[in-house]
Every structure is written in structure tokens, then in C-alpha cells.
Image (cartoon, rainbow, N blue to C red):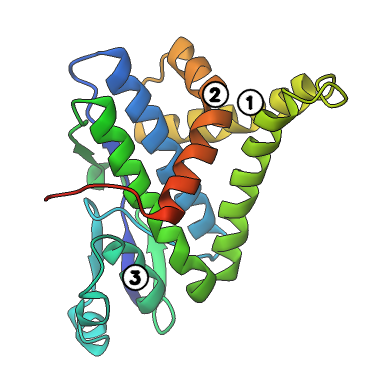
Amino acid sequence: ESGSGIVLGAASIDSVNNSSFTHYQMIDFLALVTANAGASGWGFSWTGTGQNLAYRRSAFEKLNGFYPVRDRVSGDDMYLVQAISKTHKCTFNSDAGSFVNTRPVQSIITFLNQRIRWSSNSRLAAKTDWVFLLFLFNAFLLNTAILSGSFISSLQGDIPMVFGIKFVCDALVIFSGASMLHIFVPSIIFIVWSVLQPVYIPFIGIAGLIGKFTWKE
């Protein structure tokens, strides 16, 4: 788009091997991509996926490239999106011809390490974008409340309603994203993903803040 300094593209996990674990990764990644696309539509430039990101060379050089984040092991895509969008327009490319696939990881340990590494970038959100930080905090707080409330007798009666509302909202995000990317989401895997979120999100969030992950060692 004319005047854009950086363009966000969509990516999805290649589910060609049709395994349940691959479909789980696909749904989890789809939630991130769709939420980010929606935020972009509302004028918020939070992050992007390095598999599908384009930017003007002049804007990149004005930032001195990746030099300001040379000591980080992750988050260079988030840095570019937030830094360039401060001085240039940021847009999302919804053209189906621009969508790309990325390979799934092969083990649960690798998957968790990857997600923890991504989560570790949230430590920078407090310094860069308070709206993004609020979004991340709300997701963490809601899932933590569902998990902890399940063990508190006075709150257990409210948990099904809260989880049900969250389930519907998640379904709207996931299936609208699937429609945009022209991919199939197995309903049973989506249900499993939804049930695991109240455990998965607090664990990944806390581990990311601590910075406990390994990558390319």
C-alpha cells in the first residue's frame, strides 16, 4: 500500500502431515496471527511474523537496522514493527497470494521452548506499547483466573460460564482467521486447545518472564 513503511503478512503452520500435534500448533499460531491482524485493523502495530514481513529499506536504515536489538536472541520482528510504525504507516496484507506456510516443530519440548521464547518478548512491552502489554496481561489474567478458580469452591460455580464466554470468543477469532487463510481447523483439536489454554498460558507467560528457554545453542 502506498505510504506504508512496513507490511505485515500472514503465515500458517503447514499441516500436510495431518497429525494432531501439527494441527494443535496450527491453531495456536493461527490465534496469534489473527489477533495481530485484527489489532492492525484497529490501528495498533504490535508485532509481526518474521516469515512474512516487508519493510522499506530507508525506514530500516533510519533505525540503524537491527543494531539496537543486537543483544536480543528474539523479538527482532516485534522491534521492527513497533519502531517503523512510529514514523511510517503499518498495514496488513490480506491478499491470499501473499500468505506463506511454515514448518511445524517436531516435539513438545521444542514447541514449548519456542513459545516461551516468544513470550519472553513481553518483558519489552512495558517499555514499548502499553496497549499491547494490557492485551497480553488480560489474556494471562483471564486464563489464570479460570485455572485458579477451578480449585476455589466459592468460584467453581462461575468457571463454566467464564470458560464458555472465552470459548466462544476464541472460536470467533480462530475460525475467522481460518476463513481468511483458507485453512481447515479440526473441531476436536480446537476443543482440546481451548481446554488446555488455562494451564498453557500461565505456564508460558511465567516461564517467558523468567526467560527459561533454550534456542540454537
Quarter in which the N terminus is drawn: bottom left
Q: Residue at x 28, y 26 (%)?
A: 108
- Local crowd at mark 2 within 10 Å, few (<14), some, or many (≥20)? many
Nearer the observer, 179 or 197: 197
Identify whether 121 is placed above or below 129. Answer: above
Task: Please name the amino acid that badge 3 sits on.
Answer: Tyr
- Disc 1 vs disc 3: Cβ atoms closer than 8 Å? no
Q: Residue at x 45, y 51 (%)?
A: 37
Determine which quarter of the picture holds residue 66.
bottom left
- Local crowd at mark 3 within 10 Å, few (<14), some, or many (≥20)? many
Residue sticking out furthest to the left: 217
Q: Which residue is mark 1?
A: 167
> Considering the numbered disc 1 on the image, is that residue within a helix, a strand or a loop?
helix
- Local crowd at mark 1 within 10 Å, few (<14), some, or many (≥20)? some
Q: Which residue is mark 2?
A: 194
- Which mark, by number, is residue 79? 3
Task: Please name the amino acid that badge 1 sits on.
Answer: Phe
Q: Residue at x 43, y 46 (%)?
A: 207
Task: Please name the amino acid that badge 2 sits on.
Answer: Ser
Find residue 114 and report its horizontal and vertical position in percent: 29, 42
- Sequence-first disc among 3 and 2: 3
- Sequence-first disc among 1 and 3: 3
Determine which quarter of the picture holds residue 6.
bottom left
Nearer the observer, 58 or 153: 153
Residue sticking out furthest to the top: 188
- Disc 2 vs disc 1: Cβ atoms closer than 8 Å? yes
> Considering the numbered disc 2 on the image, is that residue within a helix, a strand or a loop?
helix
Alpha carbon separation for disc pair 2 and 1:
7 Å
Find residue 210 and report its horizontal and vertical position in percent: 42, 54
> Considering the numbered disc 3 on the image, is that residue within a helix, a strand or a loop?
helix
